Image (cartoon, helix red, strand yellow):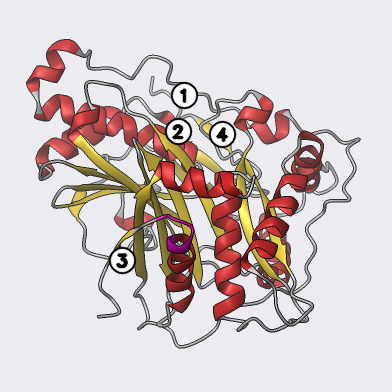
Amino acid sequence: MKKSPAWEKLDNTALLFPVIATEGMSNVYRLSAILTEDVDPALLKEAQDKVLAQFLSFRMRLRTGVFWYYFEENDKKPPQVNEENDFPGAYINKSRNNQYLFRVTYYKKRINLEVFHALTDGFGGLVFLKELLYQYLRLKHPELAKIEKDCLSPGVFLDKEDSYMKNFRRSVSHDTAYKSKKAVTLKGEKLPKGEMGVVHGYFKLAEVKAAAKKYGITLNQFLVGTYVYAMYREYLKGAPSDIPINCCVPVDLRSYYESHTMKNFFVMISAEFKPEKDEYTYEEVLLGIAETLKKQTNKENLDNILSYNVSNEANKLLRPIPLFIKNFAIRSVYESTAYGTTSTMTNVGKIELREPYEPYVERFNAMLSMSKGQNMKGAILSYKDMMVLTFTTVLADISIIKRFYSCLRKEGVNAAIETNGVWD
């Protein structure tokens, strides 16, 4: 008797992405590892297939139900592993990808994992990428296979709980509900349709920490504050504005709620700056952003945001409403709130590899695709003693990015810059 395929509900965050995803707004993020040697495509394909067999959370296809979308175990052949031939974060066409919601590509020494955000967030993507690297390196270097078993790493959790629903509290105040007030939108001449510009900045982690410490703020607050200041100086030209610059910052909730889920589990907080006078110094903007982020990253506020986000999904009266009506409502709410955000900057965190594999990986980077109203985004991560901040944008003008690195340079943070050449 044939076993029925496993199925599961989408988590609260994932419910949005199938409704709004389009060719121009893919909701796909990229995590990349740059090795010390060229990639062997055949071995990478073998590694992907072996690891995928152990990750049910990545072995899912998206299905349309009467009342909700849902995931169902995908019994099709694993997707192909191809040489990179498109811009980062391109739309994943499920019918051309055997219904899988991720893809693995390579270019010279680089391995890319691109994930449709409904599947998992950066945490889940990173777990998968690291296991893919370990498996690939064991195949490429037999000496590693002699000392490392061909299985998942110790301590890897493949937990698929919906941590949003588990930690939802009806009694929590919803005063932190997202407001649909308009924010500054970075407009201007755009790159040709379908193209996306990429700027990697590589700098020493110790230098960033020292610069942040000088102001008594965290590394994340320092980088987000500098980005907001760059937008203020270059886009608003240092002038007052009736609407704020609003930079969204994702917060991974796992450490706050003792979760190891492979599903999405994060909320957004806002770094908001509204210039009301003629001139603000770099330090004023930096400390103002640091304070507003600090106020939002406490358990009580995160409880409020989480519960507000989940409240509609948990409402029993809304459950029997047909999916096409829910989709219309979700899309309408998204459209009305999308221009409340200027940009997003996410910090994937510090990546650590197990000791035998570390010498084979030179660095990592992360990239975000564009969203409605957001024409530029930033993604941060660190590995060993290096931090990488990658800006992605569809704008032809990159003066904001130049100002950002100019500010860092003045604070003693020296960056090596690399682009994908679309502005040349």
Label located before the other in sequence (4 or 3): 4
Residue at x 76%, y 53% (from the top left corner): 321
Judged from the image, the secondary structure of the residue bearing numbered disc 2 is helix
Q: Is residue 313 visible to us here?
A: no
Which quadrant is home to the N terminus? top left
Q: What crowding class fits label 1: few (fewer than 14 Cα within 10 Å), some (14-19), or many (20 or more)?
A: some
Q: Which residue is tagged 3?
A: 87
Judged from the image, the secondary structure of the residue bearing numbered disc 4 is strand
Choose between 238 and 115: the one closer to the eye: 238
Occupied quadrant, residue 271 = bottom right
Q: Tell me the number on the disc at residue 8.
A: 4
Tell me the distance, in whole angstroms, between the alpha carbons under discs 1 and 3. Answer: 30 Å
Q: Which residue is tagged 2?
A: 57
Q: Percent from the top left, x then y, of residue 107?
A: 17, 54
Magenta portion: prevailing SS class: loop
Q: Percent from the top left, x then y, of residue 221?
A: 61, 50
Q: Percent from the top left, x then y, of residue 6?
A: 48, 29
Residue at x 31%, y 52% (from the top left corner): 97
Q: What crowding class fits label 3: few (fewer than 14 Cα within 10 Å), some (14-19), or many (20 or more)?
A: some
Tell me the distance, in whole angstroms, between the alpha carbons under discs 4 and 2. Answer: 10 Å
Which quadrant is home to the C terminus? bottom left
**Viewer-nearest of discs 2 and 1:** 1
Q: Which residue is tagged 1?
A: 158
Tell me the distance, in whole angstroms, between the alpha carbons under discs 4 and 3. Answer: 31 Å
> Is residue 351 depicted above or below 405 in this figure?
above
**Viewer-nearest of discs 4 and 3:** 3
Name the residue type under label 1. Answer: Leu
Tell me the distance, in whole angstroms, between the alpha carbons under discs 4 and 1. Answer: 14 Å
2 and 1 marks in contact (CB < 8 Å): yes
4 and 1 marks in contact (CB < 8 Å): no
